Image (cartoon, grey):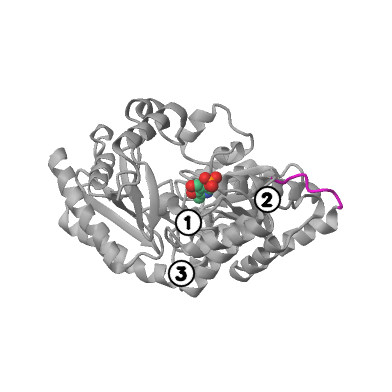
Amino acid sequence: MALYSEKQISQLFELDKKHYLHPTTPIKQHQVNGPKFIFTEGKGVYLTDVYGDKYLDALASLWNVNIGHGRKEIAEAAYQQMSKLAYSSSFSNLSHDMVIKLSEKLSTLTPGDLNVFFYTSGGSESNDTAFKLVRHYWKLKGEPQKRKIIALDRAYHGITVGATSATGIPQFHDMAASLAPDFLHAAAHQTNCEQGDTTDPNYERSIRGLIESEGAETVAAVILEPIQGAGGIIISPDGYLEAVRRLCDEYGILLIADEVICGFGRTGKMFGVDNWEVVPDIMTLAKGITSGYIQLGAVAISERLRDELAIVSNDMLFHGFTYSGHPTACAVALKNIEIIENEKIVQHAKDMEAELFKGMCYLETKHDIVTKSRAKGLLGAFELYADKENRLPFEPAAMAAQKLVEECFKRKLIIRSITYNGTNIIAMSPPLIITKEEIETIISILSESISAVEKQLH
Ligand code: PLP
């Protein structure tokens, strides 16, 4: 049942146009059309809009609502915590019980000795924190010239100035006008090169090639997503993360894994790096840490790194956010992790991978334009090609992926397109509690929608 009258709904649309500047939205289009949807409620994998229409949220909203919408236990945990302690600072060596409990809990989940945590309000802040920490580390170790950060082409690390500079998607750079210095980009997934194959034609643009041309003594860290999310659901090939880990060890460079999307079960393991049993020196976390119920990010740091910092310096760590380790966010994260563990949600995501992949393979057999299906846990994608046999992409003007997203919206399915240079990717990352039947619903809506797009394009 609709919560609002027709008149109230049109007021909401007008007020949104008038007062709300939306993230990653064309401003002109918003001013003409207003917002696409106004949602008011969510339950499980479904969202309900102002008209009372239910949409299947095959993105977990922004890759984050891992335990699904509408979990009352989370609301209860937030209520209890807010009633007890509104806020407590962690500056100047102060602490509170919830941040201690969350840190201890996280240390039981993270790989290796990543047992020390710094808190932020999201992924970008976590990545900027990691960049500052690695530079601080090398400075204190007597190597202040080790400042450069190597990230990958098509990486997405967020929108603060440091995170934007690390991001490898050119459109984000255009808006920032000038970027932070000392960020470099390497071609992604050049496993051969990272293993030392200097004859590979991509060698110079590989991480190894860049380290050699820049000089290892100037490179502080490499940052990568185990699976690139916003860049197009690009799964690291087997052997790649292992090769980068060895490369970093060989040259004395720190490895940062951006687990903002992959963390907390998304890929069928607790963390993305667990798929390849690689242990980074630093992991950045956000999104799934609270399943999006409240803002929280974290930086997991190896005990070795923290101990080395403690030995070499008695200096203050001049870094911190007012909301570092907010008690309510910590209480929500603890409850979220309890739900993930009690309901065996990580294993469920692993089990559902096969269903999602099977569904996309069915779409490939049924539709000439569908190809390149891939999934790791419940992070999946396929691509649209004008001629898949001959790998001919659609013209960008055809807007194939955008058209498919629109057709899905009409059929009450929320998915996302990622398009660049003629590449048309359709990305999915549903809540991890999704059932086999709900995945079948996604596939059947996709199939109908693809047929509609095929008619428009041929
Ligand atoms: N890192 C990755 C891999 C992300 O996907 C995102 C956001 O989508 C971020 C960092 C930035 O996180 P936030 O938007 O919470 O700042």
What residue does disc 2 label? 324
Q: What element carries label 2?
A: loop
Q: What residue type is labelled 3?
A: Val
In percent of width and height, residue 290 lies at: 54, 58
Q: What residue type is labelled 1?
A: Thr
Residue 57 place in picture, x, y as percent: 35, 53
User: Is residue 119 visible in the rendered structure shown here?
Assistant: yes
| Main secondary structure type of the part rendered in magenta | loop
Q: Mark 1 points at which residue?
A: 191
Residue at (57, 62) in percent of width and height: 77
Spot occupied by residue 423 in the image (x, y as percentages of width and height): 32, 42
Say which residue appears at 23% left-offset and 35% top-offset.
398
Q: Specify start and end residues of the magenta stretch as a single range.
A: 314-321
Q: Name the residue under label 3.
A: 346
The C terminus lies in quadrant: top left
Image marks 3 and 2: residues in contact by CB distance under 8 Å: no
Give me the C-alpha separation between circle 1 and circle 2: 37 Å
